[in-house]
Image (cartoon, rainbow, N blue to C red):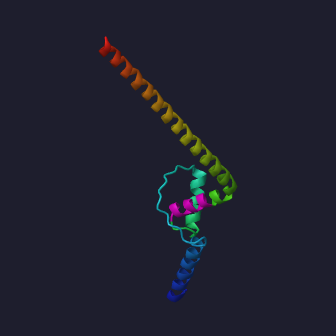
Amino acid sequence: MSEHDAKQGKKRHRERRKKHRHADGERKRDNVVMVRVDEENLTRIDELVESGQFRSRSEATAFLIGEGVKSKQQMFEKMSEKVSQIQDLRAELEAMIAEDTKLSESVEQNTGETSDQEGVNQ
């Protein structure tokens, strides 16, 4: 194989990798997640890297996570609704507790003022 053929082969390989990586559109990966995996999953991740489909374990793992999220999209949509309901209930509960606390403090202040006035009158 000539040097020119080798360069062309490498170029085609890079283009295939680039095409695969950016098939969904390039997405910025700024978030870091540390994860522990078992040997079998690590082997599969390494196979993705060795095959040339991804440059690193990080890229391969991000791909697999993305695919897992896509495959469970309906579940995540339902979960999102429930999480929103939970957040609304928490906010309602906080407001209820804050209102109750204000009422309690108001009663205590009024009771204290009455006791002070009684002491002055005596």
Residue at the location (47% across, 56% down)? 32
Residue 9 against residue 86 in the figure, above or below: below
How far from the left and from the top, in percent, is residue 78? 67, 51
Q: Which residue lies furthest to the top in this view?
A: 122
Task: Using the image as rendered, state which of residue 107 and residue 40 is in the foreground.
Answer: 107
Residue at the location (59% across, 68% down)? 51
Which quarter shows the N terminus? Answer: bottom right
Q: Residue furthest right?
A: 74
Question: What is the quadrant of residue 90 in the picture?
Answer: top right
Which quarter shows the C terminus? Answer: top left
Residue at the location (56% across, 59% down)? 61
How far from the left and from the top, in percent, is residue 101? 47, 31
How far from the left and from the top, in percent, is residue 102? 45, 32
Task: Using the image as rendered, state which of residue 92 and residue 17 is in the foreground.
Answer: 92
Asked if the stretch drawn in magenta spans residue 80, the answer is no
Count how many numbered circles sit on residues in the image.
0
Residue at the location (64% across, 57% down)? 68
Asked if the stretch drawn in magenta spans residue 62, the answer is yes
SS assignment for the magenta stretch, majority:
helix
How far from the left and from the top, in percent, is residue 22? 57, 72
Residue 119 against residue 110 in the figure, above or below: above
Q: From which residue to which does the magenta span run?
A: 56-66
Task: Using the image as rendered, state which of residue 101 and residue 4 is in the foreground.
Answer: 101
